Image: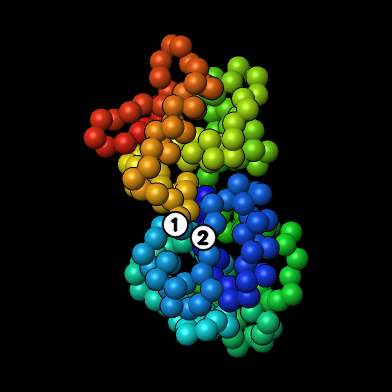
Amino acid sequence: MRILIVEDDKGISDFLKKKLKNELFIVDTATDGDRGSFLGCTNEYDLIILDYSLPKKDGKQICEEIRKKRKTAPILMLSVNSGTTIKIECLNVGADDYMTKPYSFDELLARVRALLRRPKQIKSEVIKIGKLLLDSKKHLVAQNGKQLLLTPKEFMLLEYLMNNRGLVLSRKTLLEHVWDINADPFSNTIEAHILNLRKKIGLSQKKIIQTVRGKGYKIE
């Protein structure tokens, strides 16, 4: 799952990024409204965490611009303002939830997970394909009841493939959803991770991760 954080306080931004990455989310950040709007409007995110008070452009404007681009990722608005009026304004322009600062990370994480469980964002926490089982909540992958030791990136890649079973996913799509904006599109990182996954899964009866020549990868 890929998350965008738009927050001008670098300390808060770095803290949230570190904590969310520990939960195996892919995280991009922006520290002003212009950059946040650009990333939100041009990239595919599963969720956006958006501060209301930002340099150059406020959160409400960014929210409006993202929705005008028909981006449907849930938006969690953060603000020190606890007034009812501003909450209503933000929700009316497209925010899905609103949290008042200061907040605990545990509550923010709970709200993030709740937003990701909403319709069109629902993904099963436990996915099973053949003898392969993936538990998103426990960050666990097992085959025939035996746990496989995957790196965080291998886990995220396998999770995305399994959540999109039967669909051919291009390199561009995988980079957008499993890697952050700093990923080199010309590197062979996807191929290397696919190779490592195939080795670790090691299904002899058939290749569970299939290469579709010239198009990408799919899992069956």
Residue 91 drawn at (x, y percent):
53, 76
Q: Name the side, left or right, on which 69 lies relative to 79.
A: left
Q: Which residue is mark 1?
A: 181
| Label 1 or label 2, whichever comes before in sequence order | 2
Q: Quadrant of residue 104?
A: bottom right
Return the residue nearer the eye: 183 or 167: 183
Q: Amino acid at mark 1?
A: Ile
Q: What secondary structure is marked by label 1? A: loop
Q: Nearer the viewer, residue 88 or 2?
A: 2
Q: Does the image show residue 29?
A: yes
**Amino acid tagged 2:** Asp
Determine the image quadrant of residue 103. Answer: bottom right
Residue 93 position in % (x across, y down): 47, 78
Could one spot residue 88 in this view of the protein? no
Label 1 to label 2: alpha-carbon separation:
7 Å
> Is 119 rendered above or below residue 171?
below
Which residue is the site of mark 2?
28
Q: Quadrant of the C terminus?
A: top left
Q: Position of residue 175 (x, y in %)?
A: 41, 47
Within 10 angstroms of label 2, few (less than 14), some, or many (20 or more) residues?
many
Say if mark 1 contacts mark 2, CB within 8 Å: yes
Q: Residue 124 sits in which quadrant?
A: top right
Please rate how many residues cluster around mark 1, counting C-alpha atoms within 10 Å: few if below 14, some from 14 to 19, many from 20.
Answer: some
Q: 97 left or right of 191?
A: right
